[in-house]
Image: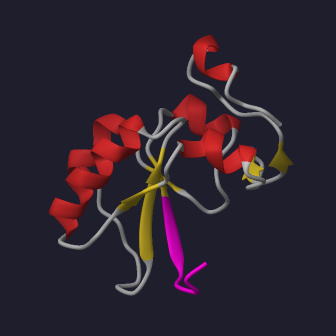
């Protein structure tokens, strides 16, 4: 919405990322945040996400400190993105309506 380029950082396990992800997201496993390097234009917004926002929130704090720039967290994670009409892509780059919800407890929050 700001008109700035946005770089999404997917902070989930590989199996979750392969089910669906935001288009062109950079995958960083939760265990790899401390060693991650992010190459992005200095004017780009960096936005982390995971399934619901917890893991990515922790990663946003670490990455912000590490990179010396603001890193935002997608409020509500991929579930909120998808529920609000955001497009997600499968491993082949095709739009999908499948979300890896991490556990059955979280599946109830996918509403579309």
Q: Residue furthest top?
A: 104
Q: Is residue 80 above or below residue 87?
A: above
Q: Is residue 4 above or below residue 84?
A: below
The C terminus lies in which quarter of the figure? top right
Residue at horizontal 49%, vertical 50%?
A: 75
Q: Is residue 63 above or below residue 7?
A: above
Q: Does residue 7 belong to the magenta stretch?
A: yes
The N terminus lies in which quarter of the figure? bottom right
Q: Nearer the viewer, residue 109 or 101?
A: 109
Q: Is residue 14 left or right of residue 70?
A: right
Residue at horizontal 67%, vertical 27%?
A: 109
Magenta-drawn segment: 1-8
Where does the image place residue 99, in percent across and percent down from the top left?
71, 33
Q: Is residue 91 visible?
A: no
Q: Is residue 12 left or right of residue 101?
A: left
Where does the image place residue 6, in percent across and percent down from the top left?
52, 74
Q: Is residue 43 visible?
A: yes
Q: Does residue 101 belong to the magenta stretch?
A: no
Where does the image place residue 48, in percent across and percent down from the top left?
43, 54
Q: Main secondary structure of the magenta part?
A: loop
Q: Nearer the viewer, residue 27 or 47?
A: 47
Where does the image place residue 16, in percent across and percent down from the top left?
58, 32
């Amino acid at each position: 919405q700001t008109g700035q380029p946005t770089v999404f950082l997917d902070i989930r396990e590989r199996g979750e990322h392969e089910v669906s992800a935001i288009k062109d997201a950079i995958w960083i496993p939760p265990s790899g945040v401390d060693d991650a390097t992010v190459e992005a234009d200095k004017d780009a917004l960096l936005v982390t996400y995971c399934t619901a926002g917890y893991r990515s929130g922790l990663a946003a704090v670490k990455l912000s400190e590490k990179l010396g720039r603001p890193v935002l967290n997608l409020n509500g994670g991929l579930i909120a993105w998808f529920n609000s009409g955001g497009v997600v892509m499968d491993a082949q780059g095709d739009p999908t309506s499948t979300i890896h919800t991490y556990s059955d407890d979280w599946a109830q929050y996918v509403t579309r």
